[in-house]
Amino acid sequence: MTEWPSIHHSSGRDRRSTSLDALVTPSSPPFFLWHTAEDSYVPPEHTYRLAAALAADNVPHTVHVFPHGPHSLGLAHGAGEASTWKRFAESWIVEQTGTRKPQGAPV
């Protein structure tokens, strides 16, 4: 069985070359980014770096960093303010595409 190299055992160069912010190009798709400041696995600085790279290449994006919530919230049901990310995403997608979700569809 092949094992993926652990990020903890990867060189800084390997980690940097696979960071999303290093892979952004002017043809990258639009990004909706959300994060929590309390994420103990992925610091919010990673999201800020990605946003800066997107801005440098004029890629449409938006960033929301919520003060509370652990890593891996998914849909964030019951996670306080972080659970509002779905409404922000819906609004942003409508703005980007000019489409709306079907009436009565869940957020």
Image (cartoon, rainbow, N blue to C red):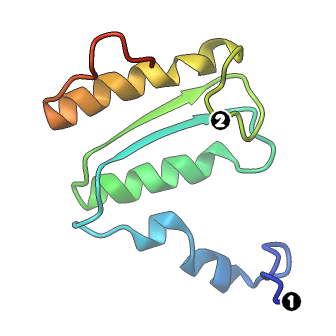
> In the picture shown, does residue 51 fall above or below 104?
below
> In the picture shown, does residue 29 fall above or below 15?
above
Q: Residue furthest left?
A: 98
Side of 104 relative to 48 (left or right): left
The residue singled out by tag 2 in the image is 74
Residue 50, horizontal then vertical, whole percent: 46, 55
Residue 2, horizontal then vertical, whole percent: 81, 89
Most foreground residue, 105 or 92: 105
The N terminus sits in image quarter: bottom right
Return the disc, 2 or 1, that comes first in the chain's sequence. 1
Most foreground residue, 103 or 93: 103
> In the picture shown, does residue 92 fall above or below 42?
above
Tag 1: amino acid: Met
The answer to whether marks 2 and 1 mark residues whose Cβ atoms lie closer than 8 Å is no
Side of 38 relative to 25 (left or right): right
Side of 60 relative to 44 (left or right): left
Q: Residue at x 71, y 50 (%)?
A: 42
> In the picture shown, does residue 63 fall above or below 45?
above
Residue 86, horizontal then vertical, whole percent: 47, 24
Q: Secondary structure at mark 1?
A: loop
Most foreground residue, 32 or 3: 3
The residue singled out by tag 1 in the image is 1
